[in-house]
């Protein structure tokens, strides 16, 4: 051990030197990495600055692009305006050239229209002279004055006539409106009556449907109860079958019937079957044709019958020969045959005599009497097999029968018996005795149990078949069950449950529809009654209006006569003066021509005025001024066009400069990127070198730690050895003073090396390493410290030991295995010697050892008690926490399940489906919720029960949102973030979701990411994300929509006030007009 310690010290010294060199390499590599990273950072800064310049120039170019586009558009606009001015100039020049011709045409046209007016005047004069009475121009003027006076005089009667006509027309309009209203009332009444009939029929059908549904529901429930009861009965029946099968199997195992028949037995049975088919006289094996009356006689009958029990019974000797020939021909085997016509049996008299001798003793019975035959014809074969053998209870009774009672019964008739005991012993008629039973005898005796076994086996097969039928019925394997319930009883129960649930839902919906229908029916009946009342009221008003119309017609006639009388006062004198009798005929003959004349003259004169005005305009036009103004405008547009082109060229030149500058900066940026890449490669290379140095350093450190661990183990081993020697008070030979000098010098050198290593360890020790010491390292820490007092003491003690007297074999270094063998040998020797010593002297330390063990036991008991108490407390705490967890979960689950039903109905409710859908949660394990899961079931309106996976995307979304809102209602969160939850929803469901969120907006805030316009319209604010091109980043755009809602509300209130004020003004004006008419 001392040599190994010295060698380890030298190795550690070398490794520490290499570690110092490696540490220097790691520091140099670290410095290189730091410098490379610094250079790479500088290169990145340069690249970043150049990139910022590039972005700035790109932004300037982007800002200049709209200016050049604007300038181009201005140039195009100026080109269009110049072309328009040129066209206008050409038009003015053309009009100037055509001015003289236009004036000449106007003068010619004025002259033509003047001649036309004169010609029209001549035609009118000629027309006046054609009548009976021709009025002069003065008379015509007087006629006009008379007409005006007559009109003034008849104004008041005419006003009364107009008022009467308006009232008459108003009454007629009202009457027509009432007539139309009566027709509308009739149509509405008919329609309402039809709806009443339709709703009545619908109500009756719904009531019939409800009654039928209730009957079907009750039938389904009854059928479900019956099926469940049948399942329970089948389960009970299955249990009974299992119990009976267990008993049968136990019985079969008890008689060892589970073994198969051997090949010989099977072959013999096949041969007998073949013989029965070919030869009708074959009865079968004797053992199959008879059976003991009681099971206790099985062995006795088997021994009495012997091998004849396996013989085959045939009717005649010839049949036996034929069977033997058949067996020989087919090489089936051999068999013994008993022909009934050729068997020699004991005489019946002797049999009866023996039976009479034994009938008074219940211990004896003839073997023939204890055998039952299936066919009377085979009794002869049975008698041949057993003869007059007597079955005895036991061997003593058999001896008494055969030997002991000879002087009483046998001596007179000299009768000898063959006795067979129930145990199988035989006393022949010759007096020989045979005892014991072989396995073959027992097996043959058990063959009469084959029928019972066959019955048990048949019963077992029946029970297994019945059990299989029950299992098939439960699994739905039979064709009848497939046709009847699409599965077995389990699937049928599930189907019936689904049917009951669907019928319950259908019944709820039908009852709701019935209530809705009754409500509509009541409304329609009220509507029919209201229409009839309105129709009756309108009919009365119509009769009143017809009476009023007759009255107004008389007033109109009176007003017409008053107008005629007023006109006649003025027309009468003029008629007498001029002789004009019929003013109306005059107006029709001359007045119409006069009106045509005046109209044509007015048209001609108006056109003449236009022509004269146009001629005046043409005379006053100055084309020179217009041409000059046009030329100035043309020149101005050309100048602006030149300025725009100049600006365009300046902007293009500036953009070209910016692009050139951008190209220079991009080339510089590319060079900087290359430099940056080179710097990054240098950093990567430096880091690789640093990693290699660090890995080498760690490897050396690991090796040093390993060597130090080995050294510590050697020191611990050395200390343990010395300590053991001290404890056992072993005498170790020591060196003299002169011999220890060299050893002291060597140990001092070792100490100095260890000290240097220790100093280095102290320099590199982690300040927090002492906190990471485990219990094992704390015990052996002193073995790693070179200057520890124990290590130094062990070193000095080892240097003083004299190894010269040690055997050479023990001085050599050996393997661990051999060292263990040596230790084992030494331990065996020590144990042997110790045993000898203990045998010579008593153990004086037994009492102390006993006290120590008792203390240890007490400490263990205390620790056990503490651990048991801690376990109880932990169990109690666990149960409390488990109970609290269950209560918290059940509270949350019940609240969420209740809220889910309400929320889902609110989100699926509509005018067509006023009740909405239904959704609920169910636990797989109600007692221990955490052992199972939660099943979520949702049934949209008018949909039957289906699994969640079969719902559409929109239905799943509505169900998921309802569950989310229900969970939120238990522990509300401050806000929601929804990311395109409306992707699978249509507009109707999106509107429902929007309304629900707005309704709940007072409880929480909601941020929705959506692509649907409906959400935009219903939201309170919009936030958009777009790209900021100059900074190459994102920016946000916000829009508050609440102000628009406020403006809309204010506008609606203002509109309402304006409508109310206008309505009031209309009411006031109508009242004022009514008062004025009164």
Image (cartoon, rainbow, N blue to C red):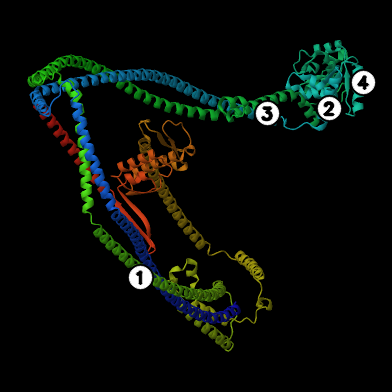
Disc 2 to disc 4: CB gap under 8 Å: no
Query: Mark 1 and mark 2: span between their CA atoms?
Result: 126 Å
Q: Nearer the viewer, mark 3 or mark 4?
A: 4
| Secondary element at image label 2 | helix
Query: Mark 3 and mark 4: span between their CA atoms?
Result: 42 Å
In the image, residue 800 sits, relative to residue 767, either above or below, namely below
| The one of 396 and 297 positioned closer to us in this rendering | 297
Can you identify the residue that label 2 sits on? 268
Can you identify the residue that label 3 sits on? 251
Query: Mark 3 and mark 2: span between their CA atoms?
Result: 27 Å
Crowding around mark 2 (Cα neighbors within 10 Å: few <14, some 14 to 19, many 20+) is some
Can you identify the residue that label 1 sits on? 650
Going from N to C along the chain, the mark reached first, 1 or 4, is: 4
| Secondary element at image label 1 | helix
Could you tell me if residue 399 is visible in this image? no
Q: Nearer the viewer, mark 1 or mark 2?
A: 1
Crowding around mark 4 (Cα neighbors within 10 Å: few <14, some 14 to 19, many 20+) is few
Residue 79 placement, left or right of 539: right
Can you identify the residue that label 4 sits on? 321
Disc 3 to disc 4: CB gap under 8 Å: no
Going from N to C along the chain, the mark reached first, 3 or 4, is: 3
């Amino acid at each position: 051990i001392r040599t190994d310690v010295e060698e380890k010290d030298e190795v550690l010294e070398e490794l520490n030197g290499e570690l110092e060199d490696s540490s220097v390499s790691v520091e140099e590599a670290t410095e290189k990495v730091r410098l490379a990273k610094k250079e790479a950072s500088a290169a990145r800064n340069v690249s970043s600055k150049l990139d910022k310049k590039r972005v700035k120039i790109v932004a300037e170019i982007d800002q200049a692009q709209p200016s050049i586009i604007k300038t181009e558009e201005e140039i195009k606009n100026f080109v269009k305006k110049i072309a328009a001015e040129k066209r206008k100039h050409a038009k003015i020049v053309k009009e100037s050239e055509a001015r003289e011709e236009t004036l000449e045409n106007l003068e010619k046209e004025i002259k033509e229209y003047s001649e036309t007016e004169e010609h029209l005047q001549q035609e009118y004069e000629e027309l006046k002279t054609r009548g009976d009475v021709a009025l002069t121009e003065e008379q015509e003027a007087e006629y006009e004055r008379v007409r005006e006076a007559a009109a003034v005089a008849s104004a008041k009667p005419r006003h009364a006539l107009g008022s009467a006509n308006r009232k008459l027309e108003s009454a007629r309009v009202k009457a027509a409106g009432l007539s139309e209203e009566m027709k509308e009332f009739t149509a509405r009444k008919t329609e309402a009556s039809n709806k009443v009939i339709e709703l009545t029929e619908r109500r009756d059908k719904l009531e019939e449907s409800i009654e039928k549904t209730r009957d079907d529901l009750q039938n389904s429930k009854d059928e479900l109860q019956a099926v469940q009861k049948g399942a329970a009965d089948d389960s009970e029946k299955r249990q009974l079958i299992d119990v009976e099968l267990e008993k049968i199997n136990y019985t079969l195992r008890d008689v060892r019937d589970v073994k198969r028949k051997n090949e010989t037995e099977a072959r013999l049975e096949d041969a007998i079957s073949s013989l029965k088919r070919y030869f009708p006289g074959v009865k079968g094996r004797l053992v199959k044709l008879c059976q003991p009356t009681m099971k206790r006689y099985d062995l006795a009958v088997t021994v009495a019958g012997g091998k004849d029990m396996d013989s085959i019974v045939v009717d005649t000797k010839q049949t036996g020969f034929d069977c033997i020939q058949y067996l020989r021909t087919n090489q089936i085997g051999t068999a013994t045959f008993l022909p009934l016509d050729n068997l020699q049996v004991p005489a019946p008299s002797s049999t009866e005599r023996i039976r009479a001798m034994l009938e008074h003793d219940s211990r004896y019975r003839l073997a023939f009497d204890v055998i039952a035959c299936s066919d009377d014809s085979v009794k002869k074969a049975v008698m041949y097999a057993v003869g007059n053998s007597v079955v005895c209870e036991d061997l003593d009774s058999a001896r008494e029968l055969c030997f002991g009672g000879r002087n009483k019964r046998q001596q007179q008739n000299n009768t000898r018996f063959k006795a067979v005991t129930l145990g199988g012993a035989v006393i022949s008629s010759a007096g020989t005795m045979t005892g014991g039973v072989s396995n073959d005898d027992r097996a043959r005796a058990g063959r009469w149990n084959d029928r019972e076994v066959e019955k048990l086996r048949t019963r077992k097969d029946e029970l297994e078949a019945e059990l299989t039928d029950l299992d098939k019925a439960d699994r739905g394997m039979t064709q009848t069950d497939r046709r009847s319930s699409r599965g077995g009883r389990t699937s049928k129960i599930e189907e019936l449950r689904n049917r009951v649930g669907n019928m319950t839902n259908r019944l709820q919906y039908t009852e709701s529809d019935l209530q809705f229908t009754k409500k509509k029916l009541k409304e329609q009946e009220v509507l029919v009654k209201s229409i009839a009342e309105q129709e009756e009221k309108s009919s009365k008003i119509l009769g009143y209006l017809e009476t009023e119309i007759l009255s107004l017609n008389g007033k109109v006639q009176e007003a017409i006569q008053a107008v005629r009388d007023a006109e006649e006062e003025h027309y009468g004198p003029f008629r007498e003066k001029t002789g004009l009798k019929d003013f109306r005929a005059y107006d029709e003959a001359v007045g119409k021509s006069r009106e045509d004349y005046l109209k044509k003259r007015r048209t001609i004169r108006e056109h003449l005025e236009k022509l004269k005005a146009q001629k005046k305009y043409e005379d006053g036009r100055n084309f020179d001024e217009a041409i000059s103004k046009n030329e100035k405008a043309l020149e101005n547009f050309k100048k602006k066009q030149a300025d725009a082109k100049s600006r365009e060229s300046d902007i293009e030149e500036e953009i070209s400069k910016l692009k050139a500058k951008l190209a220079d900066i991009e080339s510089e940026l590319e060079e900087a990127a290359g430099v940056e890449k080179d710097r990054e490669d240098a950093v990567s290379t430096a880091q690789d070198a640093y990693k290699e140095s660090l890995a080498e350093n760690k490897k050396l450190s690991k090796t040093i730690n390993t060597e130090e661990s080995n050294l510590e183990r050697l020191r611990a081993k050395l200390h343990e050895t010395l300590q053991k020697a001290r404890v056992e008070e072993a005498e170790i030979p020591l060196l003299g003073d002169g011999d220890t000098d060299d050893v002291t010098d060597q140990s001092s050198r070792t100490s100095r090396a260890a000290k240097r290593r220790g100093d280095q360890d102290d320099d590199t020790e982690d300040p927090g390493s002492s906190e990471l010491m485990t219990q094992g390292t704390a015990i052996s820490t002193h073995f790693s410290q070179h200057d520890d007092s124990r290590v130094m003491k062990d070193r000095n003690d080892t240097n003083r030991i004299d190894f010269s007297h040690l055997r050479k074999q023990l001085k050599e270094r050996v393997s661990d295995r051999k060292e263990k063998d040596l230790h084992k040998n030494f331990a065996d020797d020590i144990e042997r010697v110790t045993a000898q010593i203990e045998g010579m002297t008593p153990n004086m330390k037994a009492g102390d050892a006993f006290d120590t063990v008792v203390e240890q036991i007490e400490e263990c008991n205390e620790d056990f008690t503490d651990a048991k108490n801690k376990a109880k407390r932990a169990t109690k705490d666990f149960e409390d926490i488990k109970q609290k967890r269950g209560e918290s979960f059940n509270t949350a689950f019940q609240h969420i399940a209740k809220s889910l039903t309400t929320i889902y109905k609110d989100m699926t409710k509509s005018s067509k489906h006023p009740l909405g859908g239904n959704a609920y949660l169910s636990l797989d394990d109600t007692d221990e919720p955490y052992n199972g899961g939660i099943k979520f079931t949702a049934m949209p309106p008018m949909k039957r029960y289906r699994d969640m996976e079969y719902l559409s995307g929109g239905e799943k979304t509505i169900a998921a949102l309802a569950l989310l809102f229900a969970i939120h209602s238990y522990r509300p969160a401050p806000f929601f973030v929804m990311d395109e939850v409306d992707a699978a929803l249509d507009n109707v469901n999106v509107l429902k979701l929007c309304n629900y969120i707005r309704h709940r907006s007072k409880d929480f805030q909601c941020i929705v990411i959506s692509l649907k316009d409906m959400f935009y319209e219903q939201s309170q604010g919009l936030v958009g994300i777009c790209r900021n091109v100059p900074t190459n980043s994102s920016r946000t755009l916000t829009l508050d929509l609440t102000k628009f809602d406020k403006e809309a509300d204010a506008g609606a209130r203002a509109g309402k006030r304006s409508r109310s004020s206008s309505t009031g003004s209309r009411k006031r004006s109508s009242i004022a007009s009514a008062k004025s008419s009164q």
